[in-house]
Image (spheres, grey):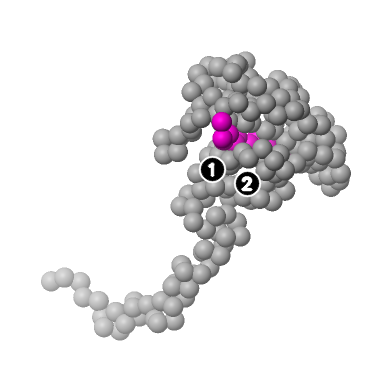
């Protein structure tokens, strides 16, 4: 003889109309509203985008990212890129760790592979300090014409890539600065913009002026003054 659930318990186990209505509202209204304010509501996997919201990269540096946005894999130190894991979102690094330019992988994943040529930007939106951003953004690195078929052992600065501004390491004066690397798709593989000034740079204005697409990938980390 099987176990019988009393009729009274069956009645209690049934969700009430009020509970069902709450669940419908949660799914149809609350969750899309959350992702609309913290990411793209249409993205099935908004995790990288949400991390950019969480670090205030959106809207401090860029207004949004597409659903195909991926984590950009960078490795410090560059001399031994495969002995260390890639930098993770908002990781704290020291100034000594970031003296030399990182090793950067430009591949894309299986679902959204990269093709064509790309531009890399590295900016600091917290200069001279997180509470006084009067000279932000500081642009630390610009490389254009990076080919998608770059060898995993090759540097992104290798020809035919074009170094518009060479890498300068993080040197925060006060507080913890965010350093953001953003990868954009180009409309062609012949992009040779003039070098901008290092301070009062705007990633959004640069991208708009030259018709870049994206960002398709990105990462950010932090370096604190004196560390």
For marks 1 and 2, the one nearer the N-term is 2
Q: Nearer the viewer, mark 1 or mark 2?
A: 1
Seen in the image, is 152 located left or right of residue 120? Answer: left
Q: Residue at x 70, y 20 (%)?
A: 100
Q: Are marks 1 and 2 in contact (CB under 8 Å)?
A: yes
Is residue 154 part of the magenta span, yes or no? no
Q: Is residue 144 left or right of residue 131?
A: left
Question: Is residue 55 in view?
Answer: no
Query: Which quarter shows the N terminus?
Result: bottom left
What residue span does the magenta drawing correspond to?
Answer: 176-188
Element at label 2: helix
* Residue 52 - label: 2
Element at badge 1? loop
Q: Position of residue 167 (x, y in %)?
A: 72, 24
Q: Which residue is mark 1?
A: 69
Which residue is located at x 51 percent, y 30 percent? 116
How far apart, in angstroms, are the residues tagged by discs 1 and 2? 11 Å
Q: Residues within 10 Å of mark 2 (few under 14, many from 20)?
A: many
Q: Quadrant of residue 126?
A: top right
* Magenta part, dominant SS: strand
Which numbered circle lies on residue 85? none
Residue situated in front as seen by the camera: 151 or 16: 151
Taking the view exactly as shown, the residue that stands out farthest to the left is: 1
């Amino acid at each position: 003889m099987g176990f019988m659930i009393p009729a009274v318990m069956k009645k209690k186990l049934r969700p009430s109309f009020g509970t069902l209505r709450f669940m419908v509202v949660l799914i149809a209204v609350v969750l899309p509203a959350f992702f609309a304010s913290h990411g793209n509501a249409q993205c099935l996997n908004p995790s990288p985008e949400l991390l950019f919201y969480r670090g205030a990269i959106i809207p401090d540096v860029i207004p949004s990212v597409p659903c195909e946005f991926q984590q950009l894999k960078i490795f410090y130190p560059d001399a031994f890129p495969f002995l260390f894991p890639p930098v993770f979102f908002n990781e704290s690094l020291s100034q000594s760790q970031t003296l030399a330019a990182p090793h950067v992988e430009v591949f894309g994943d299986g679902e959204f592979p990269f093709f064509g040529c790309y531009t890399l930007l590295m900016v600091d939106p917290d200069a001279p300090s997180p509470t006084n951003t009067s000279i932000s953004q500081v642009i630390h690195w610009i490389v254009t014409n990076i080919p998608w078929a770059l060898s995993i052992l090759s540097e992104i600065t290798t020809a035919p890539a074009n170094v518009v501004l060479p890498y300068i390491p993080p040197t925060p004066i006060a507080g913890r600065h965010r350093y953001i690397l953003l990868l954009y798709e180009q409309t062609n593989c012949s992009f040779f913009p003039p070098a901008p000034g290092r301070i009062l740079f705007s990633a959004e204005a640069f991208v708009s002026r030259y018709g870049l697409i994206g960002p398709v990938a990105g990462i950010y980390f932090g370096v604190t003054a004196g560390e």
